[in-house]
């Protein structure tokens, strides 16, 4: 099949960028979307043009590196699917598609469809961890975890940090990402010691990065390739509010922990 | 971006964060919702003989501390609700400086995406409504008599542009509550796989009932079911 692509081309962070039209003939329905772009890029390289830059790594939907907007939908809008796992059988001959990078002030474009998601790393560094001595692996089941909590923690831990939630949100909010990370550790006994500080720090860092607020509309939930539920945002709101009311200035200033 | 983003992390207080402001919006929104219900119940006395609602009005005015206490709580709620929403709206505008060429809304409701439209329209209406029925300074339907609430309502609504604005504002209120009434639970941290869908259904029903109750009054006046005395 033949596709017509309108792709955002931007040389670097300073470049203004624009949409460029490409025709991609010979697309096989068994290709993934990224493989289709590989074919297009090979053609561009052979013509001496600059290939389209896009992020990718595992290409099996678990690393969180890939992702861009296809026709206004993050990862293409197919349920529980990252763009690397999106296959060309979903499209038909002559389809015209618009490819754009995630759009958010906190995710500056590096080049073409590649954005800098370091903001997520800084949010994790602010509190998305537990402080425990490392060493040999602890005994399995040494710390009992209720099945229901283990499931909720696992559901939240499925977040791969791809940024589709931010891209799909009309406010470019990172509430689903932050909610998943807070909710993941909030449901586990290992996460309790730093639970309050985690919620405060991660929410504050999220705001520092310039992500706007959640308006509870659910676009993120629909876009999430790991199908993280809006419920995690409520969990992080609850944790943040409780922590804010319990916060003691001394603890924070001395940075204990 | 707000100035708060330049502060050290630990100095960002409750109000400085998006989650904090949304919590304030949820609480103040709930207070305003309570008023909307109470006000509707009071208003529905228009369907009783005129003495009923006029007596109710005198009763409220006979308890100035309760009346003004309520008014102050409402005023503070309105100010905080708008202040928070405006500050968040500025953040939202700054959060996506380059918009998409193509963007599809996959899941969200019309009501949820238009809160920033329905809100200001309701505010404009509330200002007109106070001038129209509370202060009586703008009462194009006829003379304003502060001791005859019944007649003020009827003559006020006989002026059809007033009624039209009222009805449009109540439809906006319906949209606003449609999303806001369940959203407040989420903002305050409550979400449940079984109960949240019920809260959402309840919010829709409440929003529609409230708007229908309010809209019934100008419609009844224009249709001639309620006549001046």
Image (cartoon, coloured by chain):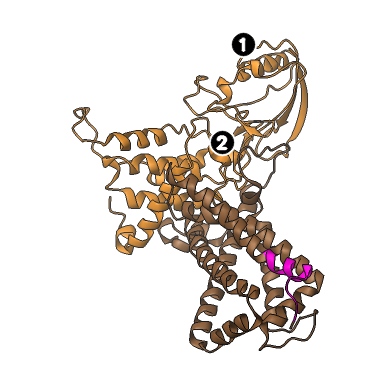
Chain colours: A orange, B brown
The CA distance from mark 1 to mark 2 is: 25 Å
Badge 1 density bin: few <14, some 14–19, many ≥20, Cα 10 Å: few
On the question of residue A188 being in view, the answer is yes
Determine the image quadrant of residue A165: top right
Q: Is the magenta stretch mostly helix, strand or loop?
A: helix
- Give left or right: position of A5 versus A241: right
Q: Are marks 1 and 2 on the same chain?
A: yes
Q: In the rendered image, which residue does mark 1 sit on?
A: A30
- Give left or right: position of B73 versus B213: left
Quadrant location of the C terminus of chain B in the rendered image: bottom right
Position of B112 relative to A38 (above/below): below
Of A121 and A193, the residue lying toward us: A193
- Give left or right: position of A135 versus B149: left
Residue A222: mark:
2
Which of disc 2 and disc 1 is earlier in sequence? Answer: 1
Q: Residue at x 80, y 83 (%)?
A: B142
The magenta segment is B215-228
The stretch drawn in magenta includes residue A187: no
The chain to which mark 2 is attached is: A
Residue B10 drawn at (x, y percent): 40, 58
Quadrant location of the N terminus of chain B in the rendered image: bottom right
Q: Which residue is drawn at 43% across and 40% down?
A: A180
Residue B125 drawn at (x, y percent): 70, 69
Position of B80 relative to A200 (above/below): below
Secondary-structure class at tag 1? loop
- Give left or right: position of B168 versus A64: right
Position of B154 relative to A115 (above/below): below
The stretch drawn in magenta includes residue B221: yes
Residue A7: mark:
none
Residue A106 drawn at (x, y percent): 57, 45
């Amino acid at each position: 099949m033949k596709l017509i692509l309108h792709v955002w081309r931007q040389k670097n962070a300073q470049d203004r960028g624009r949409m460029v039209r490409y025709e991609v003939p010979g697309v096989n329905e068994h290709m993934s979307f990224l493989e289709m772009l590989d074919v297009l890029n090979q053609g561009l390289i052979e013509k001496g043009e600059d290939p389209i830059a896009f992020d990718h790594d595992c290409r099996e939907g678990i690393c969180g590196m890939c992702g861009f907007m296809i026709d206004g939908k993050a990862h293409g809008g197919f349920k529980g699917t990252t763009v690397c796992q999106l296959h060309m059988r979903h499209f038909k001959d002559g389809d015209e598609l618009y490819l754009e990078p995630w759009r958010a002030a906190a995710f500056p474009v590096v080049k073409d469809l590649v954005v800098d998601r370091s903001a997520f790393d800084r949010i994790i560094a602010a509190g998305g961890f537990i402080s425990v001595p490392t060493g040999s692996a602890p005994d399995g089941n040494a710390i009992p975890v209720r099945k229901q909590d283990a499931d909720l923690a696992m559901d939240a831990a499925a977040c791969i940090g791809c940024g589709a939630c931010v891209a799909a949100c009309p406010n470019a909010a990172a509430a689903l990402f932050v909610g998943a990370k807070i909710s993941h550790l909030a449901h586990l006994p290992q996460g309790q010691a730093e639970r309050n500080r985690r919620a405060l720090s991660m929410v504050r860092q999220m705001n520092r990065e310039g992500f706007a607020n959640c308006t509870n509309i659910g676009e993120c939930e629909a876009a999430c390739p790991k199908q993280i539920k809006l419920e995690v945002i409520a969990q992080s709101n609850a944790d943040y509010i409780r922590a804010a009311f319990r916060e003691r200035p001394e603890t924070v200033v001395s940075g204990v922990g | 971006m707000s100035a708060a983003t330049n502060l050290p992390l630990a100095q960002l207080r409750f109000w400085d964060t998006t989650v904090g402001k949304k919590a304030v919006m949820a609480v103040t929104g709930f207070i305003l919702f309570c008023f909307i219900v109470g006000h509707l119940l009071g208003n529905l006395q228009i369907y009783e003989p005129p003495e009923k609602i006029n007596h109710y009005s005198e009763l409220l005015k006979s308890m100035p501390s309760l009346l003004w206490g309520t008014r102050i709580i409402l005023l503070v709620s309105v100010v905080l609700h708008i202040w928070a929403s405006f500050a968040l709206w500025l953040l939202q505008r700054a959060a996506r400086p380059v918009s998409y060429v193509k963007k599809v809304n996959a899941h969200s409701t019309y009501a949820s995406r238009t809160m920033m439209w329905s809100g200001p329209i309701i505010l404009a209406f509330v200002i007109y409504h106070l001038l129209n029925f509370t202060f009586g300074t703008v009462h194009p339907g006829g003379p304003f008599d502060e001791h005859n609430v019944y007649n003020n309502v009827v003559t006020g609504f006989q002026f059809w542009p007033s009624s039209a604005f009222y009805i449009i504002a109540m439809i906006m209120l319906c949209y606003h509550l449609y999303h806001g009434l369940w959203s407040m639970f989420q903002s305050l941290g409550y979400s449940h796989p079984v109960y949240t869908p019920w809260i959402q259904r309840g919010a829709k029903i409440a929003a529609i009932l409230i708007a229908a109750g309010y809209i019934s009054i100008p419609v009844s006046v224009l249709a001639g079911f309620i006549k001046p005395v």
